[in-house]
Image (cartoon, helix red, strand yellow):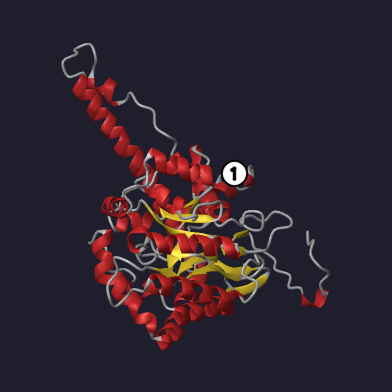
Amino acid sequence: MWIGQAVDSSRVETVELSADQFLMPGLIDTHTHAPQFTFLGLGHDLPLMDWLEKYTFRHESQFKDAALASSFYKTAIARVVRNGVTFAAYYGTIHVEANCILADTIRNAGQRAFVGKVCMDVNSPSYYSETTEESLQRTEEFIHTVMGDNAGDESALVRPIITPRFVPTCSAECLQGLGQLAQKYNLPVQSHLCENPDEVAFAKSCFPKQKSYSDIYHMAGLYGPRTIMAHCVHMDDDDIELVRQCGVGVSHCPNSNFSLSSGMADVRRFIEHGIPVGLGTDVGGGYAPSILDAMRMAAAANRALIATRRDARSKDTLSKVVDATETKPSDAATDHTDAAPLNAAELLFLATQGGARVMGMHEQLGSLDQGKLFDALVIDLAVPSSPVPDAATTLAVHEHLDSSPVEAWKLRAEQFVFLADDRNIVRVYVGGKLIHSL
């Protein structure tokens, strides 16, 4: 039911869905790097810190050329929209002009977004760094350019987000200054946390007096319910507790975590602690700018983590009972309790409502509930060359079509999660406006 302002009926388009189509909330990408589309699919044989040195810093530095930003970002954003992402949290570069071009490109495409000017004033290559003063001044300049005097206007389609790259490349003065800017302009914050063991050790060595990696951000005033922390793979109990207490959201980026051999984040652990969790593509650490891919990778990481822990417990149990003849190895190997695998409904939640919670926009987005903004997708499972098989030829679905249509659509939704791609996303709406169609 429409509850907004009255609209001239002549301006209303009626869309009738076919038997193979359905409407769903838009997908939300809680973590991606727009300039890293320039080396998408490269460097996945490297660990994080080496990958940053060989690819990331060098390619991001090239965006000092505004002409490159103007020509490149249009294609990159169109690809993200084509994959059904209605709302994304983007990292830009350290360059104000290029970041403003990125924000304008997203706005012109009609997508909803947070856009961050990356800040890095220490432990950075000489060709891609800035002083603390430059980092803070340029961030404030970017905020004013994008939002003018309305930086706190949550109704704006594209908004700035405070973006320290991560602890190893930011001084205490830079982090604290960014915390002050976040508070001054009522802005969200995004960064990276506990992604890779080497990165965690490096961060802690930079701030040896802080209790945990999380505490470094917290002491700078960067933690709160509008903070997005990406990865969170190697979290100790102190990290978990501080994230929970502060209401920080986690962007789970399984493709990147696998591709850079960073590890497997424990999504169930976050959920059990009441921590908001969404999905991120983390281009270009991740090689697919698709939240559909992120759902599948999240399922794979979850199952791999369950299997790894099961096998570790089995080996430990077997070693303890090797001389206990009354205990059979087969009994010991199956004596364990595992968390339930993430199912398709949970994966869809992470990709929509979970993402909205992480972005601090769950009251406005993430579902098709009455009163929320209409960020939505029309999905067609029967497009030509669809990767999703026809319902009539999928016997598990076909047998429910007449007797239990609700059950049949649950199965079709599961097929969508695990089989569909951008060919099946035939319409993309943001704020009720059609921004992409096939």
Q: Is residue 299 visible?
A: yes
Which quadrant is the C terminus positioned in? bottom right
Tell which residue pokes out farthest to the top in this image: 326
Is 411 situated left or right of 405 in this image?
Answer: left
Residue 152: x percent and y percent? 63, 66
Residue 378 can be seen in this image: no
Q: Residue furthest left?
A: 323
Residue under the image location 51 percent in, 79 percent down = 100
| SS type, badge 1 | helix
Q: Which residue is mark 1?
A: 407
Name the residue rendered at 27%, 34% in the picture.
Answer: 311
Percent across and percent down for residue 359 are 55, 57
Identify the amino acid type marked 1: Glu
Image quadrant where one finds the N terminus: bottom right
Drawn side of residue 285 relative to residue 138, left or right: left
The image quadrant that residue 5 belongs to is bottom right
Residue nearer the viewer, 36 or 377 = 36
Residue 365: image location, x then y, percent: 63, 58
**Dot 1: within a 10 Å radius of its alpha carbon, few (fewer than 14), some, or many (20 or more) residues?**
some
- The one of 381 and 105 positioned closer to us in this rendering: 105
